[in-house]
Amino acid sequence: MFVEAAPAAIEKAGLTPDQIDGVVMVSTTGIAAPSLDALVGPTIGLRPDVRRVPVFGLGCAGGVNGLSLAARLAAADPGSNWLFVTIETCSISIRLDSDDPAAVVATALFGDGAAAAVVTSGLHSLARITGSAEKLWPNTQRIMGWDVEDPGLAVVFDRAIPPFIEANLADAVDEMCAELGIARDDIDRFCCHPGGVKVIDAIETALHLNQGELNLEREVLRDYGNMSAPTVMFVLERLLTQGLPDKVMMTAFGPGFTCASLLLEAA
């Protein structure tokens, strides 16, 4: 999956693998040491001195948080090219020894996916990343995540997620917007991680969006399921193909319980 996603992003950016200076690799459904970027980097032609930042534990929020991290690293080193790759293999986490309803729902909902993008402090061919923010709610650790058990990862997936989002998202987005120096009304389109149909409905209700406004999110969920971190990148790709509005806020929820956001402006 890395070998397919990463070179495609590098080629689309008009670069070659030896021009990549650093890699941010995000995954929560598996652990490897050496990390995947070290295992696969030479195969796709990354330089031996490429800087590697493997990130674990962000869950579904990893697509937004990882892209944000790559952007900050690129900005800190003007002229550098950073490759962001996120891969989730949710299917290997199926627990055949468990009849936990959360595990059954997760097995039906989650899929496998990979996405990649190149971020640079130079020319912006697709979009410009102008800021990022995050909201972590205290005492919400049991809403979403993994329990690490002897047979494998056991999903923590609370049915309270949609009502929690409906009750708390608007205030969180307003706080993050204030941190980024904008108002919620300045956002032309939200680009959201589609955690599930009920989650999409909750987002639309909380942010007073028109029903069906998150149509691309529904399409990605229908076509691929919830692939955890890469999913929001699939939505972004469709939004770019459709035509990126002037100001877009990417959002994704993850273990913590947290909401990550990233502000994009059309190039």
Image: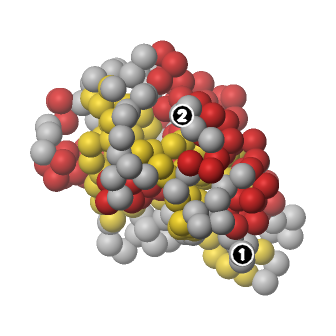
Give the camera-side residue of 168 and 18.
18
| Secondary structure at numbered mark 1 | loop
Q: Quadrant of the C terminus?
A: top left
Instruction: For label 2, count other residues whose C-alpha is less than 10 Å away and answer few (under 14), some (14-19) or many (20+).
Output: some
Tag count: 2
Q: Position of residue 164 (x, y in %)?
A: 38, 53
Q: Residue at x 30, y 31 (%)?
A: 265
Q: Amino acid at mark 1?
A: Pro
**Quarter occupied by residue 221:** top right
According to the image, label 1 marks what residue? 34
Q: Where 55 sits versus 124, above or below? A: below
Q: Where 252 sits versus 10, above or below? A: below
Q: Where 239 sits versus 96, above or below? A: above
* The disc label shown at residue 13, or none: 2
Spatial separation of the CA atoms under disc 1 and disc 2? 27 Å
Instruction: For label 1, count other residues whose C-alpha is less than 10 Å away and answer few (under 14), some (14-19) or many (20+).
Output: few
Give the camera-side residue of 127 and 123.
123
| Secondary structure at numbered mark 2 | loop
Does residue 115 appear anywhere in the picture? Answer: no
Q: Residue at x 41, y 34 (%)?
A: 191
